[in-house]
Image (cartoon, rainbow, N blue to C red):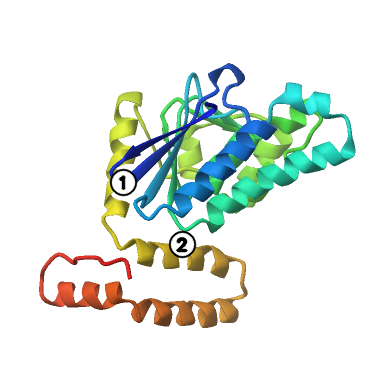
Amino acid sequence: MSIKVINQKDISRVIMNEPKTYNSLSFKNLNNLIKVFKKLDNDKKVKVIILEGAGKGFSAGHNLKEVKSLKKKQKYQKLFNLCSKLMIQLVEGKKPVIAKVHGAAYAAGCQLVASCDLAYSTKDALFATPGVNIGLFCSTPMVAVSRKIGRKPMMKMLLTGEPIKANFAKEIGLINDCFTKSKLNFEVLKIAKKIASKSNLTIKIGKQTFYKQLEMPLRKSYSYTSKMMTLNMMAMDAKEGISAFLEKRKPVWKNK
């Protein structure tokens, strides 16, 4: 299987398992990832998803051998639409997704990191939008990456095609943090467990609200988030959480 899923209690690890192609985002792998994420999204036992790559690195982006073989305009369009579908699934899905990155995350692989809610990497990880080097500007990858970092560092990455190191990726907000190889797994699991301990209904409402309000003008976003806060307040978990806080005890989530 090109995609491997390992379930650990309420955390699911999704592993891109095609080291030969550096976990490229081919038609096959994109379709498989979309299927896996949709399935996990509907699995009530799963609270947090970790996305990682097998072998030497995270993902090198599109499979250039496959891209070269497509030749027709409709086939190129189909590939880029499918890739966009995966990125939208990550953002619009109900579960928080954490990218766990080692090695290189290039082009659509970098887009994948930016599309996840959180991202952590090894200290020697590299991130790039190198399309300009092969005459193919990283136009779709920049949608996700430019929504996570500022314009100047984004344009430098796009115009030069040069990779950036993990510590700089952290500085500009592409990733949350970077760790030594031996510590990465422990740190990612620690944050995943912390998120999994919250009410997953609250997390679902919050994730959806966060991304939607980002696209709205200020007044509209306040109006929308006030409605969502009210909706959240009507849930049993909000009432339980407030009671638990006032009674100085741990909340017992019903996820309702």
Residue under numbered circle 1: 191
Note whether 255 is above or below 143 in the view shown.
below
Neighbourhood count class around disc 2 (C-alpha, 10 Å): few under 14, some 14–19, many 20 upward:
some
Task: Say if mark 2 contacts mark 1, CB within 8 Å.
Answer: no
Q: Quadrant of the C terminus?
A: bottom left
The reply, left or right, for residue 16 in relation to residue 217 is left
Percent across and percent down for residue 53 are 48, 29
Note whether 57 is above or below 73 in the view shown.
above
Q: Which residue is the extreme one toward the top?
A: 20
Task: Give 42 or 154, whichever is nearer the viewer.
Answer: 42
Residue under numbered circle 2: 207
Q: Which residue is the extreme one toward the left?
A: 248
Note whether 103 is above or below 197 in the view shown.
above
Percent across and percent down for residue 101 are 46, 33
Q: Which residue is the extreme one toward the right?
A: 72
Q: For the residue labelled by badge 2, is the local secondary structure a helix, a strand or a loop?
A: helix
Q: For the residue labelled by badge 1, is the local secondary structure a helix, a strand or a loop?
A: helix
Residue at the (37%, 65%) spot, across then down: 201
Task: Give 174 or 44, whichever is nearer the viewer.
Answer: 44
